[in-house]
Image: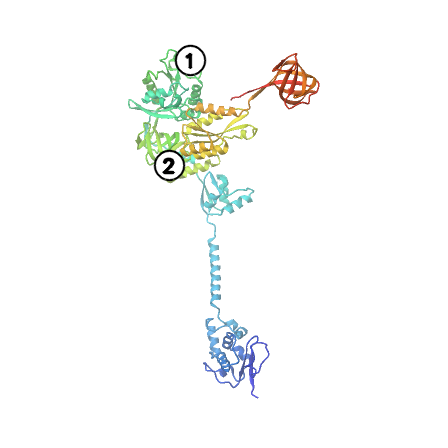
Amino acid sequence: MEKKTKLTISGNPKKSYKNFGSSKPQGKKTVIIGKQQEKPSGKGNFNKSFGNKPTINNFKNNSAFKSNFQNKTSFSTTDFEKRKLAEQRATKKLKSDSDNDKKSKIGVKKRQVKLTVSRALSDEIETRERSLASVKRARQKELKNVNKEDSKENSKPIKRDINIPEAITIRELANKMAEQSSNVIKFLFGMGVTVTINQTLAADTAEYIVKEFGHNPIREEKAEEIIKKIKESRSENLKNRPPIVTVMGHVDHGKTSVLDVLRSANVVSGEFGGITQHIGAYQIENNSNKITFIDTPGHAAFTEMRARGSKLTDIVILVVAADDGVKPQTIESIKHAKAANVPIVVAINKCDLPEADPQKIKNQLLEHELIAEELSGETLMVEISAKKKQNLEKLIEAIILQAEILDLKTNFDNKATGVVLESKIDTGRGPVATIIVTNGTLKKGDFFVSGLKWGKIRAIINDKGKNIDEALPSTPVEILGINGASKAGDDFIVLDNEKDAKNLSESRAQENKDNKNPLTFATQESAFTDKSTEELNLIIKSDVHGSSEAIKNAIGQIKHEEVKPKIILSDIGMVTETDVTLAKASKAVLIAFNVKPSKEAKKLAEKESIQISSYNIIYEVLDFIKKKMSGLLTPDVKETITGTAQILEIFKVSGAGKVAGSKITEGEITSVSEIRIIRDGSIIYTGKVETLFREKNQVKQVNNGQECGITVKDYMDFQKNDIIEAFNITSTERSI
């Protein structure tokens, strides 16, 4: 019997050669190879590779066999040729194992010699080559470690110089330090302080945080300190400047009329109600001497405007009417001038009137420490008449003389500084500010800061309405180019460039952030007042900031226990749709002072039934507000007892029900009287008389001592000895 050699790669039962063709593949493949098979047609010698007696050990060492063998899925054993082909593929010639060992040691690629079971089980596993993927992973790991080491070296903290303003948010501070905001918040939280990313920190706190994070804090100069240095900068090139003169006094004493004559312009006719509502600034020239005049309102509401004018001025002209005398606003103007330490020149106006008494005025001024020169004093007093143009030259001479005594000088070459007299928003030109240059020369194209606003001078307009290229010291001008409406009384400073102007403006805004005034004028005191107090919500739109300020101050003076005004918005410019919407939402009274609503706002107001009250005179605004506040007051109710009656008997009358037979004990009772029924001292019913009988007849009135029958509307539960009391109620409207 021919001897067969069986090779298996599994624990499946061995099968004979005879049964090979008919057997079906089960589990893993089994190959049965006879000893005396013909050589395969492939390259190499099968017998040389395996020897005469193939064993499992030989099979293990032949990796090519197994690697090629394992790639085969299945084959049909019914066909001998197919079996033969399988044998040939399985016995494909390989290079010697020695060659394989050499090449593996010098780094043969994985694709040339695949990992087989025999190779995996052999001792050569230590020497087999690494795959491309493993090499790549190793290199990436090595590179990662190197990067970590480099990052550790580079992660040394960088010490930065941090500029710290007076106020800074946590976000801004973290950005300057190149730190995460969360780290700064965690640091403060660890100190027991709970903050948000937009929380504003004081300079001292920010400085401490910067030090703790390992940086170098540098305190920035305050915006006000920078401005102070600019204003104090001086040079030797000083020249005389025109004096700035403020005209002050009581309302209707002729302040504007005096300026009107000096300026040869009719300004009074342009003022509503004949009173000055704004600060006007003009410059006149007399014999080559220039004088700048500031006209202030005399109405009591314009206290702030007068105070602002006195602080800006070099000389105050106090206008007093010779026929009227010293009035409250006259006294107030004197106080403002003395507070500003400004010399006063008294102009006694209306001396042409028959009832004029200049000496009386001089005596009244003595009470306020204003002593005329003729009385050995230092105050210049000139008797004038604006209407007759009398002694106006003497007034100008007195001003020039006073200016020479003051020796007013400034530097014309410095960058300009000044003060904002008034500001407004013009429909065609945008924000417009009226300023007076106090130092230096203002030029077209200059970058500047005014309060919290900044801009570039686009146009300079003088008091005569002409465009000019530059404005010298003491010159009043209008400027265009500001990025918003500045406040009246704000300073005005020219800077070197746009960046400096913008930074200074932002610095000021940041410093002012925490102290920003709310839109409402609710004070700490009002926060604790009785909430039952009625409030009149107000929205005020005015033409200029000064008028808005004056109205707010005047409204603040209106006091009442039961009702109070509350300004929810005060702004300049025309009435817009937003104002109307706010008025509707807040049930506010909308007041337009010297401005008109836009077309859109007017349509919306008509649609929503919102009244826009327009006024041109400030005291009319105040009267209107007082009237509105009076409407919120409960009327005074007064009750008067007109008569009393006592019920003696009770009768039943068909068609009338129960009738109270009564006797009038006091006064009288009519058929339309309001009555109340009193039993045992308690009021048990209040109503009206329905019918009044006298001897079975209906009557309209029953007097004291008479007997009558009374029926009460919707009441019949009478008892003997009940008291019927007739009374009358009168209601009286209250006003503020």
Label placed on residue 685: none
Which of 553 and 289 lies nearest the eye of the viewer? 553
> At 52% across and 42% down in the image, what residue appears?
196
In this orientation, does residue 244 appear? no
Residue placed under numbered mark 1 in the picture = 363
Residue placed under numbered mark 2 in the picture = 455
Spot the residue most to the front: 654
Picture coordinates of residue 231 (x, y %)? 38, 32
Q: CA distance from mark 2 to mark 1?
A: 51 Å
Total marks placed = 2
Q: Are marks 2 and 1 in contact (CB under 8 Å)?
A: no
Indicate which label's residue lies in the foreground, 2 or 1. Answer: 2
Question: Above or below — where is 503 with respect to 645?
Answer: below
Question: Above or below — where is 9 with respect to 355?
Answer: below
As helix, strand or loop, the secondary structure at mark 1 comes to helix
Left or right, residue 526 beside residue 260: right
- The amino acid on which the numbered mark 2 sits, given as a three-letter code, is Gly
Left or right, residue 489 beside residue 667: left
Instruction: Determine the image quadrant of residue 678.
Output: top right
Query: Looking at the rendering, in which quadrant would you find the N terminus?
Result: bottom right
As helix, strand or loop, the secondary structure at mark 2 comes to strand
Which of 592 and 198 lies nearest the eye of the viewer? 592
Picture coordinates of residue 520 (x, y %)? 49, 31
- The amino acid on which the numbered mark 1 sits, given as a three-letter code, is Asn
**Dot 2: few (<14), some (14–19), or many (≥20) neighbours within 10 Å?**
many
**Dot 1: few (<14), some (14–19), or many (≥20) neighbours within 10 Å?**
some
In this orientation, does residue 370 appear? yes
Picture coordinates of residue 319 (x, y %)? 39, 18
Spot the residue most to the left: 287
Q: What scheme was used to colour the molecule?
A: rainbow
Picture coordinates of residue 562 (x, y %)? 55, 25
Of callouts 2 and 1, the N-terminal one: 1
